[in-house]
Image (cartoon, grey):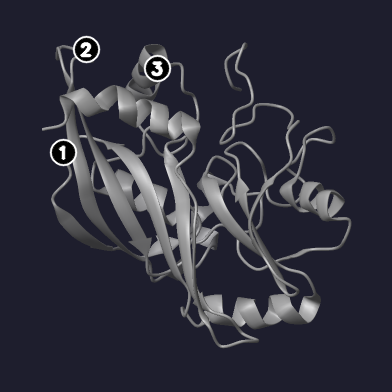
């Protein structure tokens, strides 16, 4: 549960959403929106009856049905694309399946990551929304590849454990596959977990950053999608910002860039 007293921002919601979703791109076949962290994409057995869902929220906002073509984890903010018909969605799903869509993320992680890296580590896929770590052996192991580059490093005078300073890296990330929690699991595997990741991250750093900044959301944003429009053949590059809360943390660290 999120701490009491958190308020909705443009890139985070706690228990409800009051502002309209930000539409980034729309034509007669597709719509792309910015999903705030904390908002689940579609309803499942794990969602609560009262909580908002991106699919229904967007449907009501546009007053028409929308069809998801890919997904983002609940705590991940950023760009997500929908078809405005089943046929349009199917064409775009095919592009994602064939890895013809390039996805770009940014994340703030613990420590000084190497300048660039390619994480090639197969992952066990979860099944639906009822993942049970104790039964992980039941799920298939699939290829998973993530590329990243360091955009900036920070050495910040925020104490952690016995250290008087904390180290962070801002990463540009391009997942080459699309497995469950892939970026989060891969970055944790190389000892550079995403700040604010309460499942795969470092609890000490999460609490320290929240205490210093008041920002609770996971600092991972899907920022760009590059794809060829299935109907026009045009190349599209759709881009969003990291979000105000993410930017606030980076701005506070900027004087300590190394």
The crowding category of the residue bearing disc 3, from other C-alpha atoms within 10 Å (few below 14, some 14 to 19, many at least 20), is: few
Q: Distance between the Cα atoms at labels 3 and 1?
A: 20 Å
Q: Residue at x 73, y 52 (%)?
A: 42
Q: Earlier in the sequence, mark 1 or mark 2?
A: 1
Q: Note whether residue 5 is visible.
A: yes
Q: Are marks 3 and 2 in contact (CB under 8 Å)?
A: no
The single residue placed furthest to the right in the displayed view is 63
Which quadrant would the C terminus be assigned to in this image?
Answer: top left
Q: Residue at x 73, y 32 (%)?
A: 17
Q: Position of residue 244 (x, y in %)?
A: 48, 32
Q: Note whether residue 196 is visible.
A: no
Q: Secondary structure at mark 1?
A: loop
The crowding category of the residue bearing disc 1, from other C-alpha atoms within 10 Å (few below 14, some 14 to 19, many at least 20), is: some
Q: Are marks 3 and 1 in contact (CB under 8 Å)?
A: no
Total labels: the figure holds 3
Up/down of 81 relative to 42, above or below = below
> Disc 1 designates what residue?
112
Q: Position of residue 155 (x, y in %)?
A: 15, 26
Which quadrant would the N terminus be assigned to in this image?
Answer: top right
Mark drawn on residue 213: 3
Q: Position of residue 239 (x, y in %)?
A: 48, 57
Q: Earlier in the sequence, mark 3 or mark 1?
A: 1
Q: Distance between the Cα atoms at labels 3 and 2?
A: 13 Å
> Disc 2 designates what residue?
159
Q: Nearer the viewer, mark 3 or mark 2?
A: 3
Q: Residue at x 32, y 44 (%)?
A: 188
């Amino acid at each position: 549960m999120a701490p009491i007293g958190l308020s909705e921002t443009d890139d985070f919601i706690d228990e409800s959403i009051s502002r309209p979703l930000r539409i980034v791109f729309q034509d007669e076949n597709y719509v792309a929106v910015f999903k705030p962290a904390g908002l689940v994409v579609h309803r499942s057995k794990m969602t609560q009856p009262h909580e908002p869902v991106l699919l229904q929220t967007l449907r009501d906002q546009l007053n028409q049905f929308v069809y998801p073509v890919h997904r983002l984890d609940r705590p991940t903010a950023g760009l997500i694309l929908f078809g405005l018909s089943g046929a349009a969605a199917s064409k775009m799903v095919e592009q994602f399946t064939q890895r013809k869509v390039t996805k770009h993320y940014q994340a703030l992680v613990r420590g000084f990551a190497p300048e660039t890296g390619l994480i090639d580590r197969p992952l066990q896929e979860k099944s639906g929304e009822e993942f049970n770590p104790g039964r992980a052996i039941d799920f298939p192991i699939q290829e998973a590849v993530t590329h990243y580059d360091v955009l900036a490093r920070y050495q910040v005078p925020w104490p952690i454990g016995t250290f008087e300073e904390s180290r962070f890296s801002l990463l540009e990330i391009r997942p080459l596959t699309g497995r469950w929690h892939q970026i989060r699991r891969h970055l944790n595997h190389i000892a550079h977990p995403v700040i604010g990741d309460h499942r795969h991250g470092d609890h000490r750093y999460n609490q320290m950053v929240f205490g210093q900044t008041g920002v609770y959301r996971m600092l991972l944003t899907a920022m760009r999608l590059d794809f060829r429009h299935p109907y026009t053949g045009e190349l599209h590059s759709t881009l969003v910002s990291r979000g105000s809360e993410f930017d606030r943390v980076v701005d506070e660290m900027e004087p300590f860039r190394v």
